Amino acid sequence: MRRGSVDIITLGCSKNLVDSERLIAQFRAEGLKVRHDPETISAETVVINTCGFIGDAQEESVNMILECGELKKAGRIGRLYVMGCLSQKFRKELMAEIPEVDGWYGKFDWNGILKEMGRKWHGEIGNDRCITTPPHYAYLKIAEGCNRVCAYCAIPLMTGHYRSRSPEDILDEARKLVAKGVREIQLIAQDLTYYGTDVAHRPTIAGLVQGLSDIPGVEWIRLHYGYPDQFPMDLLPVMRERDNVCKYMDIALQHISDPVLKRMHRNITAQQTRELLARIREEVPGIHLRTTLMTGFPGETEEDFGQLMEFVREQRFERMGAFAYCEVEGTYSALHYSDDVPDSVKHSRLSTLMRLQQGISLELNEAKVGRRFRTVIDRLEGGYYVGRTEFDSPEVDPEMLIDASAATLGIGEFYDVRVTGAEEFDLYGTVENILT
């Protein structure tokens, strides 16, 4: 056991990661040695930041808590604390089942961990964080909570109503990130496009993005987790006209069949969805859209799934993920619908959908061969520099692979790269010149 040390384990989404980074800054202000997601867990204090979104994520979180509980019983770690979404939703049940945990904290009260440890909360730190991503990019969370009522989603049950951070607070944090060397900001929230509605009674995300793009040193701003219903159209000119706002939008659509969308409580129709996508592509030429789709939602028929397949063929999304419906306790669908699509059918449809997307992705990537793209270098790995274009988010999107024997490149630097080869989910390229 390493005395005076803390191991923090983050599970789930980038929004959780931001919370962990803030907690790391607090621990280090107290003089503690902190590791994030270590290969071997051995600290005097261990904090697990959990995810509770879907069944697989919940299971992963519970298994990690149980694993660390065994380490504690064996004397290999000292105190064990749990925070985050899973703890927010199932705290009482988990407390009774896993007594090895010294303290349970939710999504918003995790500052109490320091108090329980006899440590001080450093309010003077403000928005300061210890970045755990490569130093040239960072996630910037602009809001908490969600006001949507999607039938399958437990997030509002865990995070409560939408709460926008003030633009001044967000811009201040962005400037601090840039001062640390961050050049690419990944803008995140549970629902980015709702930003400001809880305060101004209308979305104000366009003005916020414009303000962020004015900050010297911000090379790229990438937008994550938009919502199709009541999409703020004034955001599109900002994306089109600002060179440092990536032509990229992550907007989860879930389905296209009207009966399924209605049962999901998505408040949008198939026609409205198609009209929205057409307008986005018209107003922001060259934009790459990432979406997430679901198979096997209660009541989904073969006809519904057929419409989903045709929609994907028609739209040819540049980026797409999908998952099979998993009933989550407390959600509207769990309370009111029968989970009537067999798991085998859910996953068969999922595999069929992703095979279709794999072919589309290959075709779209092959069309890029011979073209040049501004590319940031994230790391050196296996004889290749690994980078991303403005159309690629870290960890989930295609990467640009550049032969490391052909040039010496700087991590976090931007280069002009010509695509020389393509696979389903990766590109190969050569550097032509440095961009400033």
Image (tube, rainbow, N blue to C red):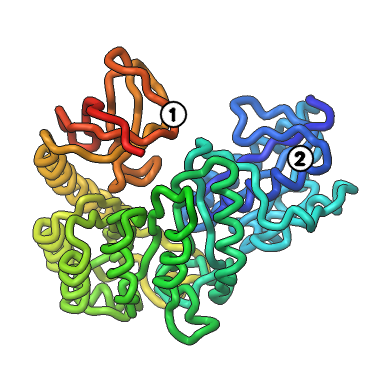
Query: Label 1's element?
Result: loop
Q: Is residue 51 above or below residue 420?
A: below
- Residue 79 location (% of width, % of height): 80, 39
Query: Label 2's element?
Result: helix
Q: Residue at x 80, y 47 (%)?
A: 102
User: Label 1 is placed on what type of residue?
Assistant: Ile
- Which disc is residue 60 wearing? none
Query: Is residue 330 among what the camera can see?
Result: yes
Q: Quadrant of residue 94?
A: bottom right
Q: Quadrant of residue 33?
A: top right
Tell me if 329 is positioned left or right of 284 in this view: right
Q: How many numbered markers are drawn?
A: 2
Residue that label 1 marks:
411
Q: Nearer the viewer, residue 168 or 201?
A: 168
Tell me if 185 is positioned left or right of 169 in this view: left
Q: Quadrant of residue 431?
A: top left
- Residue 51 location (% of width, % of height): 55, 52
- Residue 218 location (% of width, % of height): 45, 50
Mark 1 is surrounded, within 10 Å at the Cα level, by few (under 14), some (14 to 19) or many (20 or more) other residues, namely some
Q: Between tags 1 and 2, which lies in front?
A: 1
Q: Is residue 311 above or below residue 46?
A: below
- Which disc is residue 28 wearing? 2
